[in-house]
C-alpha cells in the first residue's frame, strides 16, 4: 500500500461523515415536526379536527409498520450510501406533496410518502454510524448525530418565532419545510462521495461487509434485543404523540401563546441537543446501559400528570422530559449494535423502527380520539387529562422493560451492556 494512503480513515474524516449524514437527518426531523406548530391554523383555516391532525402525524408512521423493515433489508443489501440517498429523495418528494394542496387526502398522502422515506433514512444513517464508530466512540457519535438532527426539530418548533411572517396562513410554513427537506438529499449525496472515496483510498476492514439476510434471523436476535424494542416503542409513543398535541394543549389548558408553546416544546429538544452527546460520553466510559434506561424512564412518569393537574411552571416538567429524551436515545440505539451482528444491523434497526411506528401511529390516533371524545378545548381544559394519563402509563411501561433488560443483562445470557466501555 502506498505510504501516502493511511490504513484507516483519520478521526477527522469519520467526524465529517457523521456531520453530513446528520445533515440529512436534520432535514428529516424538521419536516416531521412542521405539522404541530400549524395545528391551530389547520383548524381555523381548513376546518381540520383534532383527529384530522392526529391522522397527519399517524399516517407518517403507518407505512413504516410494513415498509421500514424492508428499508432495513435494503440497507443491508444495497449498502448504506445508496440507501441514504434513495430514502432522502423520497423524503423530499413527500414534503413537496404535503405542501401542494389544502385537501386532507393530499396532505395525508404527502405525509405517508414522507414517512416511507423518513424512518428508513434514520435506519440507514444509524447503520452508517455503527459502521464507522463501532468499538470507538459509538454512544458519543450517536448522541452527536441526534444533536445535529434535533436542530431540525428545534428550528421547526421555534419557527413561529423566527419565521413569524409565515404563520399568517397554513401553507407558507410547509413551503419552508420543503427547503429543509432538500438537506436530506444534499447530505446523502455528500456522504455517498465520502464513502466511495474511503473505499478506494482506505482500509475499512470488515465494518462494511454484509451477509445474506434471512428473514428467519428476525427471530434469533435474542431476549435483550426484544426488551430494548419494547422500551423503544413505549418511550417514543410517550414523546412524539405528545408533541403533536402539545401546542394546542398548552394554549387551551395553560393559556400559553403559540410562540410560548413553541418555546416550551423546544426545551425538550434543547436539552436533548446538549445533553445527549455528553451522556453518550458518560455511557461510553461507565457502561450501565440498562440501569441508565431505568432512570430515564422513571423521569418520564410524573411529567404528564404535573402538566394535567397542577399549575407548576411548565418549564419544570418539560425539563424533566428533556432529560429523559436525552438519556434514553443516547443509551438505547447504540446498545443494539452490541447485541446484533453488523451484517444484520440494518434489518435489526428496521424491525425496531417498524414496531416503534406501530406505537407512534396508534397513540397519535388514540390521543386525538381521547381529546375529541372528552371535548378538550380552552373551554374544557380538563378534557386533556385522559391523554395525560395515557402518556404517564407509557412511562411506567418503559420502566418495566428497562428493569427486565437489566435483569437479563446481569445474568449468564447478557451481552455486556452493563460493563462494556469504549476502547
Image: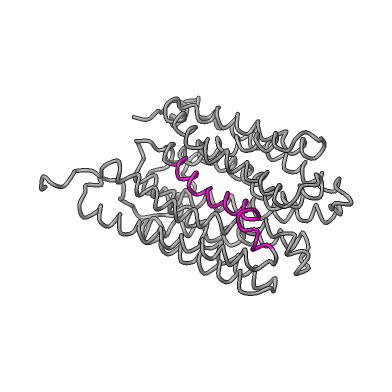
Find the magenta span and give its range: 142-167
The furthest residue to the front:
165
Viewed as shown, does residue 198 lie left or right of 100? left
The magenta stretch spans residue 145: yes
Q: Is residue 21 visible?
A: yes
Q: Is residue 288 above or below residue 375?
A: above
Count how many numbered circles sit on residues in the image. 0
Of all residues shown, which one is farthest toward the left? 2
**Position of residue 186 measured from the top left corner of the image (x, y, whole percent):** 41, 61
Q: Residue at x 50, y 30 (%)?
A: 289
Q: 64 left or right of 191?
A: right
What's the residue at 68%, 66% (across, down)? 170
- Location of the C terminus (image quadrant): top left
* Residue 112 against residue 204 in the figure, above or below: below
Q: Main secondary structure of the magenta part?
A: helix
The quarter of the displayed image where residue 267 is located: top right
* Figure check: 165 above or below 261: below
Q: Is residue 403 visible?
A: no
| Horizontal side of residue 342 vs 240, given as left or right | left
Quarter of image, res 109: bottom right
Residue 62: % across, % down: 62, 60
Amino acid at each position: 500500500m502506498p505510504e501516502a494512503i493511511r490504513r484507516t480513515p483519520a478521526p477527522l474524516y469519520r467526524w465529517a461523515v457523521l456531520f453530513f449524514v446528520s445533515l440529512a437527518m436534520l432535514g428529516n426531523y424538521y419536516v416531521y415536526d412542521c405539522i404541530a406548530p400549524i395545528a391551530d391554523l389547520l383548524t381555523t383555516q381548513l376546518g381540520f379536527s383534532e383527529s384530522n391532525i392526529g391522522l397527519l402525524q399517524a399516517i407518517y408512521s403507518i407505512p413504516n409498520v410494513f415498509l421500514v423493515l424492508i428499508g432495513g433489508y435494503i440497507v443491508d443489501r444495497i449498502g448504506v450510501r445508496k440507501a441514504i440517498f434513495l430514502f432522502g429523495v423520497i423524503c423530499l418528494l413527500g414534503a413537496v406533496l404535503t405542501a401542494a394542496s389544502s385537501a386532507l387526502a393530499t396532505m395525508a398522502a404527502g405525509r405517508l410518502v414522507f414517512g416511507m422515506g423518513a424512518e428508513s433514512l434514520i435506519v440507514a444513517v444509524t447503520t452508517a454510524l455503527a459502521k464507522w464508530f463501532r468499538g470507538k466512540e459509538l454512544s458519543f457519535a450517536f448522541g452527536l448525530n441526534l444533536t445535529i438532527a434535533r436542530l431540525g426539530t428545534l428550528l421547526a418548533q421555534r419557527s413561529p418565532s423566527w419565521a413569524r411572517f409565515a404563520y399568517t396562513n397554513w401553507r407558507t410554513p410547509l413551503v419552508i419545510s420543503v427547503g429543509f427537506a432538500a438537506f436530506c438529499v444534499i447530505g446523502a449525496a455528500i456522504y455517498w462521495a465520502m464513502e466511495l472515496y474511503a473505499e478506494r483510498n482506505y482500509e475499512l476492514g470488515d465494518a462494511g461487509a454484509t451477509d445474506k439476510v434471512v428473514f428467519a434471523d428476525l427471530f434469533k436476535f435474542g431476549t435483550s434485543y426484544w426488551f430494548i424494542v419494547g422500551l423503544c416503542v413505549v418511550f417514543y409513543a410517550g414523546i412524539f404523540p405528545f408533541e403533536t398535541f402539545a401546542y394546542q394543549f398548552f394554549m387551551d389548558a395553560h393559556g400559553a401563546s403559540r410562540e410560548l408553546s413553541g418555546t416550551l416544546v423546544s426545551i425538550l429538544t434543547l436539552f436533548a441537543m446538549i445533553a445527549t452527546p455528553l451522556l453518550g460520553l458518560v455511557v461510553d466510559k461507565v457502561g450501565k446501559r440498562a440501569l441508565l434506561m431505568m432512570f430515564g424512564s422513571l423521569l418520564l412518569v410524573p411529567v404528564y400528570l404535573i402538566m394535567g393537574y397542577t399549575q407548576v411552571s411548565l418549564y419544570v416538567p418539560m425539563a424533566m422530559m428533556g432529560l429523559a429524551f436525552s438519556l434514553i436515545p443516547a443509551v438505547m440505539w447504540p446498545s443494539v449494535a452490541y447485541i446484533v451482528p453488523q451484517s444484520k444491523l440494518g434489518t435489526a434497526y428496521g424491525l425496531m423502527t417498524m414496531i416503534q411506528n406501530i406505537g407512534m401511529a396508534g397513540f397519535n390516533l388514540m390521543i386525538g380520539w381521547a381529546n375529541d371524545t372528552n371535548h378538550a378545548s380552552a373551554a374544557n381544559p380538563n378534557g386533556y387529562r385522559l391523554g395525560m394519563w395515557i402518556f404517564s402509563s407509557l412511562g411506567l411501561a418503559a420502566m418495566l422493560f428497562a428493569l427486565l433488560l437489566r435483569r437479563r443483562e446481569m445474568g449468564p445470557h447478557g451481552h455486556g451492556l452493563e460493563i462494556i466501555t469504549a476502547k
